[in-house]
Amino acid sequence: MFRRIRASCFALLLFGFQAPILNGQLASPLFQNPQVPLVVHTVSGSEIHLKTVIVSKPEDLRQGLMYVKHLPANTTMLFLHQQPRTASMWMKNTYIPLDMWWVDANMTIRHIVHRTTPHSLESIAYDKPVRAVIEINAGLTRLLGISEGARVEFNTR
């Protein structure tokens, strides 16, 4: 009996310390917003089919992938802006390394940053106006053969 109570107390204590991170992860737009198909048309003519979660509301744009501990390999997050603008990102409270693609109004990838550093407060930016920034697991951009000049296609429903 004492062992069961001690184990239960330990589990509650452990969960209590993890609750803010778990709640932050579950509150992420990654889990709250619907996934839609994303097709990347590479410069070499291949089509890469992925899923994306589109974020466009200010609170979702601010949160992004913060607190997320796992991003499925076939899933991205697409930060969509109403009008083209310069965009900068950071990795505050982001646990996984990412590749980032800056996408212009014609849905062409114009700039790529590979392997961002988790938890970094350094600004990651592109100085030309873009309509979207897409985040994907670090390393997948090169592995899938995606480069600047590739076009992306998605439906906002």
Image (spheres, rainbow, N blue to C red):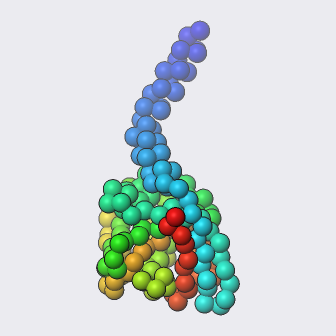
Q: Residue furthest top?
A: 1
Residue 147 appearing in the image:
no
Percent position of residue 125, x then y: 34, 77
Tag count: 0
Q: Is residue 156 left or right of residue 130?
A: right
Q: Residue furthest right?
A: 46
Indicate whether 110 appears above or below 78. below
Percent position of residue 1, x then y: 59, 9
Percent position of residue 128, x then y: 34, 86
Q: Return the residue nearer the eye: 16 or 85.
A: 85
Indicate whether 64 appears above or below 12. below
Q: Return the residue nearer the eye: 12 or 148.
A: 148
Indicate the quadrant where residue 35 lies: bottom right
Q: Residue at x 52, y 27 (%)?
A: 11
Percent position of residue 150, x then y: 55, 86
Residue 99 appearing in the image:
yes
